[in-house]
Image (spheres, rainbow, N blue to C red):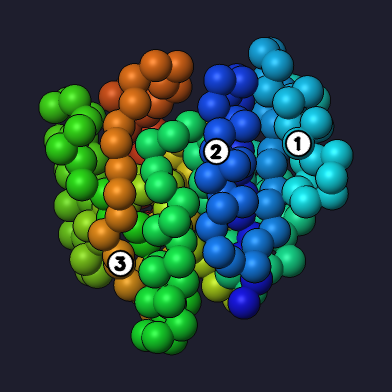
Amino acid sequence: MKVSIIVPVFNEEETIEEIIARLRAVPLEQELILVNDASSDASGSIMNKLALDGSLKVLHHPVNRGKGAAIATGLAHATGDVAVIQDADLEYNPHDFVPMLALLQKKQVDVVYGVRNLSSQRLVMRWGNRFLSWLTSLLYGRTVSDMETCYKMLSRKVYQGLKLECRRFDVEAELTAKILKGNFSFAEYPIQYIARYENKKLSPLDGLPALKALLKYRFRD
């Protein structure tokens, strides 16, 4: 089963080579798709160099459009049986894709979320994440333990039907809303996670657009 791994990249020159090495070490049939969201550092040239052997696809946005737009671009070029999103930093361990895929196949579900242990996050971020997951569960009537997780593994019928509108970090809320409103079967798996704070782009204020998106897609036909 081929896994399309979508990697949105914005100014990650310090970590992009390491995360690609980690992804390549995962024992899965994979399609690596890197989307450079108009990085102003050396990320783009590093990605082009990594792609010289033909083992991955590199797509470039001419202007910065946001994480949501980068994910949409990556998914539009995906051909895998499933697709999953990987941040370009080192917070997550991509070896968790193996048991997530096994769970998707064993339970025959459409979507698997990787659920983080948030103990390494700062208090305001941790409680913000917990609140948004609680609100998601309340609004949509299904338990979601970690709405904001990057690790969302989607079957082809799910990701090919998505028409993403959110352009920034609120894309996580949009993805979750459309998965739940679409009545796709859903499972969760506990993953490894260590929060980072150097070059961090997400802030507590990004919780407000996520909140708005949860409400918007819950009550919009």
Residue type at mark 2: give it: Ile
Picture coordinates of residue 198, whole percent (x, y):
39, 16
Instruction: Name the residue located 76 percent from the left edge and 56 percent from the top edge.
Output: 77
Marking on residue 123: none
Helix, strand, or loop for circle 3? strand
Residue type at mark 1: give it: Leu
Foreground label between 2 and 3: 2
For marks 3 and 1 on the same chain, the one whose residue lies earlier in the sequence? 1
In the picture of the structure, the residue carrying the numbered disc 2 is 19
> Label 2 vs label 3: CA separation?
23 Å
- The reply to whether residue 174 is in sight is no
Instruction: Name the residue located 50 percent from the left edge and 39 percent from the top edge.
Output: 87
For marks 2 and 3 on the same chain, the one whose residue lies earlier in the sequence? 2
Mark 1 surroundings within 10 Å by alpha-carbon count, few (fewer than 14), some (14 through 19), many (20 or more): some
Marking on residue 188: 3
Marking on residue 50: 1
Quadrant position of residue 44: top right
> Label 1 vs label 2: CA separation?
12 Å
Looking at the picture, tell me which residue is in the foreground, 213 or 195. 195
In this rendering, position of residue 201 left or right of residue 21: left
Residue type at mark 3: give it: Glu
